[in-house]
Image: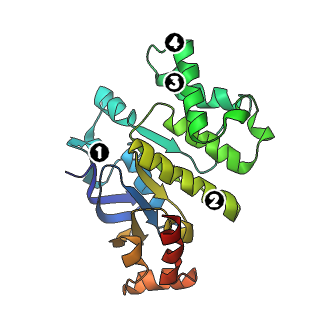
Amino acid sequence: MPQIRFENVVKRFEGRDVLAGVSFTVEKGEILAIVGPSGTGKSVTLKHLVRLLTPTSGSVWLDDVEISSATGRDLESIRNRFGYLFQGGALLGWLTVAENVALPLREHGGRLTEQEISERVDEALAAVELTDAADRYPAEISGGMQKRAGLARAIVRRNDIILYDEPTSGLDPVTSVTINNLIRRLNKERGITSIVVTHDLQGALLFVDRVLMLKDGHVVEVSEPAEFVKSTNPDVREFLDAQLITPDILERRDKNE
């Protein structure tokens, strides 16, 4: 059974179907990129996974539990399995990096001691290579470091699923590669299932397992990168051509691996 399933999900806002019958699956330990033009439902899809939105019709599943109908403790249990890296990092400016990373543990960590919280924070910061910035404030570090701090906060509870909303938005190409490589490394080392909403198709093709493309609320393609760049689907071809992406881009992936 796939870890995550969307079954014919429709989400309607003010008479418009932002998602128009979306169906796909995500396997445990997989990295899935969701791409497509702006306003096509990518972030709306993510929000359904943590029940920030509920489908107008259709259903969303995590293993054998229907997220889209869960309430109370069942919903809380589901949300506890997810980490979320927000587009802007969403760090609190009056807290240090370490204090920001500790927030999920203080709010939802149960009965962890201060020593245990400190150890978890140190572990998360080490995983994203940010130990030296623990006592600095968000305004004192670069945008790339802020994204890494946000990623540390997303994994500090040792969640098994991480959702990424535009993780490389606003970053220079070198820093973007660093973030993408971190996502891939955490996936391999921890078996994390990752769903990445991104406009950076070129970067995504180099580290994800599959690419799902949305257009006008519909799934137009779901395939591995090697198949995606060779797709004959007119919508996919238009999207690839607009970003000047050709099949030889995957030669860089082969060298990295």
Whole-angstrom CA distance, mark 4 to mark 1, is 34 Å
Instruction: Specify which label sits upstream in the sequence, 4 or 2.
Output: 4
Q: Position of residue 125 (x, y in %)?
A: 61, 35
Q: Position of residue 172 (x, y in %)?
A: 71, 62
Instruction: Specify which label sits upstream in the sequence, 4 or 3.
Output: 3
Whole-angstrom CA distance, mark 2 to mark 1, is 33 Å
Q: Hey, what amino acid is under mark 4?
A: Thr
Q: Secondary structure at mark 3?
A: helix
Q: Hey, what amino acid is under mark 3?
A: Leu
Please tell me whether mark 3 or mark 1 is closer to you in this view. Answer: 3
**Relative to 226, 252 lies left or right:** right
Residue beneath the point at 52% across and 28% down: 104
* Residue at image mark 2: 176
Please tell me whether mark 3 or mark 2 is closer to you in this view. Answer: 2
Q: Hey, what amino acid is under mark 1?
A: Ser
Q: Secondary structure at mark 1?
A: helix
Camera sees residue 37: no
* Residue at image mark 1: 68
Residue 134 position by quadrant: top right
Please tell me whether mark 4 or mark 1 is closer to you in this view. Answer: 4
Numbered tag placed on residue 113 in the rendering? 4
Q: Secondary structure at mark 2?
A: helix
Residue beneath the point at 24% across and 44% down: 63
